[in-house]
Image (cartoon, coloured by chain):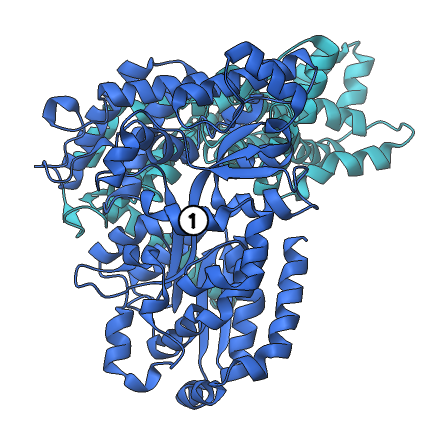
Chain colours: A cyan, B blue
């Protein structure tokens, strides 16, 4: 009883902060999402319009297009980060000259704010000024212009995200790999298992919890990406990199369409929860059932 | 001289001169007595004129009055975001907000701003002897409400001008080649056809001579509203399409079918001409906002272009940033036949008169102290050094100051143009739905720029979208 009370006392400050800065704003956004509200409309007051915003979103081409490019971005970026991150984590498990220097350099992007990453990549990719288009042209005769080519802009953003966030995946997977017991690996070696079999039947199942946690973090981050994209392309060319985060930003801030913007935010949150739940059910629940 | 140095020199000069120059120090000290515990908080865009306020004028004011002024300079988007949220929620964090000319009507529609004329009329003790609304240029009229009162103290004003390279235009070999090719002398263009001819000539000249030189700038970012502004505020008016092609007196019609001009033949011709210029501009143009256009010109990569006046200063005079110092001329934008007569006759305008003011939010808890500060920065006495440090003119007397006249020489006569021809330019139309219509239609413009939509089809869609948005907002019935 005593320990319960102490626990609640210790938790109280966090819960109070969370309530005021997390729960209340969220409830307010849900409340606003059922209203038509643009402070610069002819009628600037908040008008309850039921589920009209939610009905509208289903037929909103701009939202659906934004959802499409976001899903494509999430799939390409997160999958690439997992594969590259795992390979790097495995590399860092071995000893090689200059390992600590390489690991430090490799981790540096993580400490950069997304808006800075966007600025740096903008400088590197601006046509005729940036180093990347310059050398692509000089060495390979490739013209790269993220202001006109939608695939180039999309690919640049995916690569930028991979560069920025792969170190996070590497670090979490190194932690997972380091904590694995040696016995199963030695046993597999004695039984004559090859590398692929060892990975598939021992390593992967054992690091799955860490892998899922990493996927959750990256998935949620990627779904709400704004800063880097805003800085690099502003959502262009056209709407080719207008990811959901950018779409919501443009709807809520410049357009001051608070009602509809809140609706999109709620839907995006709902989609994120559904995707994470599906991931959880498909990857972790079967393990729990087996153990049970 | 770079901006930081100018700010430093200005600060020093003004500090030394302050005791002599301000004979009315006693007024400021007396008027500020009731506000000694006040700290004023302001938010503005991180631009040279605003940085000058933060670094020079605010400290001077604090020293003179004891009223502390904290000026937060941030990005354009953040500045609006912070100011609007504060005024919308009524939190009263800010006592001073930057009002860009194009958003004043939205703010006035929501009663976000305090009436500075009334504030001074109601509190005569606050009225500084050196401050008068009559001192401002006509640009101040953009910040007046329907009652004629002033809701913002002008702090910067520029026109978007036609900038050209005098070294290239006066080069004997180039002049001869141009004459041979076109049959006319190489002088700044007055029509679109002449401008296009010069642009094509220089882009080819750059190619033929293996130079990083193109014939024109283009503010044609494919994902940033800068391109929308270039078309509707700079290019379209020169073809006779005013106020974004929306007729406010005709139920806010945008399409030709309903009485607007957003998709008129003139608008379509303007769009085609602009796209043709974009195609021969430097490759970075598709990713260029107003900032990058200035950078492109300052880097010596173009022979001519349409450039915001706020950038003209450093392009023409700042050797630490510009490679074309001393080689810049200014002129009026090229026009379609008949437009100048139309504008001189009182209809329309030939380009964009840009700028901003400082206002006091209705929600400010220190309006009187804020009014003192606004009068301080609105005095004739502080203008010349400010105009030299960050080229902008808001007071009539500033033009005659020797320092400003010397600067005018460096800028190729920019201040003369602003004073003598400023009346031909106009700010954004008086729409309370500025950002809303821009954001609704901009994605279609981006598609035109990427070639996903043709100019004619695209403008038809933009007009329809503008009308739909105005209907949603309740302005169009």
Query: Could you tell me if residue B301 is visible in this image?
Result: no
Residue A50 in the image: x percent, y percent?
A: 14, 40
Report the residue marked by disc 1: B418
Which quadrant is the C terminus of chain B positioned in? top left
Q: Nearer the viewer, residue A282 or B339?
A: B339
Q: Nearer the viewer, residue B355 or B221?
A: B355
* A175 displayed left or right of B398: right
Q: Nearer the viewer, residue B243 or B88?
A: B243
Q: Nearer the viewer, residue B109 or A163?
A: B109
Residue A270 in the image: x percent, y percent?
A: 35, 35
* B41 displayed left or right of B13: left
* B461 displayed left or right of A68: left
Residue B363 in the image: x percent, y percent?
A: 30, 68
Residue B107 lies, with reference to residue B304, above or below; the image says: below
Mark 1 nearby-residue class (10 Å; few <14, some 14–19, many ≥20): many
Q: Residue reaching furthest right?
A: A97
Q: Residue reaching furthest left?
A: B477
Circle 1 chain? B
The image quarter containing residue B472 is top left
Query: Could you tell me if residue B361 is visible in this image?
Result: yes
Residue B157 lies, with reference to residue A175, above or below; the image says: below
């Amino acid at each position: 009883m005593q320990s319960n009370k102490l626990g609640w006392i210790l938790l109280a400050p966090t819960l109070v902060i969370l309530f005021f800065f997390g729960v209340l704003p969220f409830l307010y956004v849900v409340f606003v999402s059922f209203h038509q509200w643009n402070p610069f409309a002819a009628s600037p007051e908040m008008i309850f319009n039921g589920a009209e915003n939610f009905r509208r979103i289903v037929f909103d081409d701009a939202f659906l297009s934004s959802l499409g490019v976001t899903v494509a971005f999430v799939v390409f970026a997160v999958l690439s980060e997992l594969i590259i991150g795992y390979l790097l984590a495995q590399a860092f498990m071995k000893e090689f000259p200059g390992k600590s220097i390489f690991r430090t350099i490799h981790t540096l992007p993580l400490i950069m704010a997304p808006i800075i990453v966007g600025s740096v990549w903008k400088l590197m990719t601006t046509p005729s000024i940036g180093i990347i288009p310059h050398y692509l042209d000089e060495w390979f005769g490739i013209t790269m212009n993220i202001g006109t080519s939608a695939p180039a802009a999309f690919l640049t953003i995916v690569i930028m995200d991979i560069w920025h966030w792969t170190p996070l995946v590497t670090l979490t997977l190194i932690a997972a790999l380091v904590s694995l017991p040696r016995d199963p690996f030695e046993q597999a070696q004695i039984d004559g298992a090859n590398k692929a079999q060892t990975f598939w039947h021992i390593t992967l199942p054992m690091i799955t919890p860490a892998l899922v946690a990493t996927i959750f973090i990256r998935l949620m981050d990627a779904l709400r990406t704004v800063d880097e994209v805003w800085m690099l392309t502003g959502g262009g060319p056209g709407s080719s990199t207008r990811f959901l985060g950018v779409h919501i930003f443009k709807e809520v801030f410049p357009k001051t369409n608070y009602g509809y913007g809140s609706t999109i935010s709620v839907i995006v949150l709902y989609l994120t929860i559904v995707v994470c739940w599906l991931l959880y059910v498909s990857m972790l629940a079967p393990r729990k059932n087996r153990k049970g | 001289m770079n901006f930081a140095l100018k700010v430093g020199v200005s600060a020093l000069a003004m500090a030394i001169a302050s005791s002599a120059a301000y004979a009315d120090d006693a007024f400021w000290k007396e008027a500020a007595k009731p506000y000694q515990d006040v700290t004023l908080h302001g938010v503005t865009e991180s631009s040279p004129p605003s940085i000058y306020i933060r670094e020079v004028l605010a400290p001077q004011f604090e020293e003179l009055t004891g009223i502390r002024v904290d000026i937060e300079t941030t990005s354009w988007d953040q500045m609006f975001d912070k100011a609007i949220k504060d005024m919308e929620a009524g939190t009263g964090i800010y006592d001073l907000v930057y009002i860009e000319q194009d958003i004043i009507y939205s703010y006035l529609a929501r009663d976000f701003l305090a009436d500075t004329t009334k504030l001074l009329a109601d509190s005569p003790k606050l009225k500084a002897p050196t401050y008068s609304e009559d001192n401002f240029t006509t640009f101040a009229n953009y910040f007046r409400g329907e009652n004629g009162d002033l809701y913002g103290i002008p702090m910067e004003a520029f026109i978007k001008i036609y900038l050209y390279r005098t070294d290239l235009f006066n080069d004997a070999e180039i002049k001869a080649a141009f004459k041979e090719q076109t049959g006319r002398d190489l002088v700044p263009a007055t029509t679109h056809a002449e401008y296009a001819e010069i642009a094509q000539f220089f882009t080819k000249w750059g190619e033929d001579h293996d130079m990083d030189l193109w014939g024109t700038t283009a503010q044609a970012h494919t994902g940033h509203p800068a391109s929308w502004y270039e078309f509707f505020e700079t290019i379209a008016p020169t073809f006779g399409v005013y106020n974004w092609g929306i007729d406010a007196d005709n139920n806010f019609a945008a399409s030709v079918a309903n009485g607007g001009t957003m998709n008129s033949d003139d608008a379509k011709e303007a769009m085609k001409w602009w796209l043709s210029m974009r195609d021969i501009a430097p490759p970075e143009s598709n990713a260029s906002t107003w900032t990058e256009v200035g950078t492109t010109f300052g880097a010596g990569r173009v022979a001519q272009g349409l450039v915001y006046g706020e950038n003209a200063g450093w392009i023409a005079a700042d050797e630490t940033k510009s490679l074309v110092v001393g080689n810049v001329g200014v002129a009026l934008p090229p026009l379609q036949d008949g437009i100048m007569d139309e504008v001189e006759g009182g209809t329309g305008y030939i380009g964009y008169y840009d700028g901003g003011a400082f206002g006091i939010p209705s929600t400010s808890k220190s309006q009187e102290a804020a009014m003192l500060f606004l009068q301080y920065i609105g005095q004739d006495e502080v203008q010349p050094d400010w105009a030299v440090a960050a080229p902008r003119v808001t007071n009539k007397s500033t033009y005659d100051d020797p320092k400003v006249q010397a600067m005018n020489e460096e800028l190729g006569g920019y201040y003369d143009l602003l004073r003598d021809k400023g009346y031909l330019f106009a700010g954004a139309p008086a729409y309370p739905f500025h950002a809303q219509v821009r954001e609704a239609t901009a994605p279609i413009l981006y598609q035109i720029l990427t070639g996903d939509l043709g100019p004619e089809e695209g403008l038809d869609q933009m007009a329809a979208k503008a009308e739909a948005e105005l209907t949603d907002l309740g302005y169009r019935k």
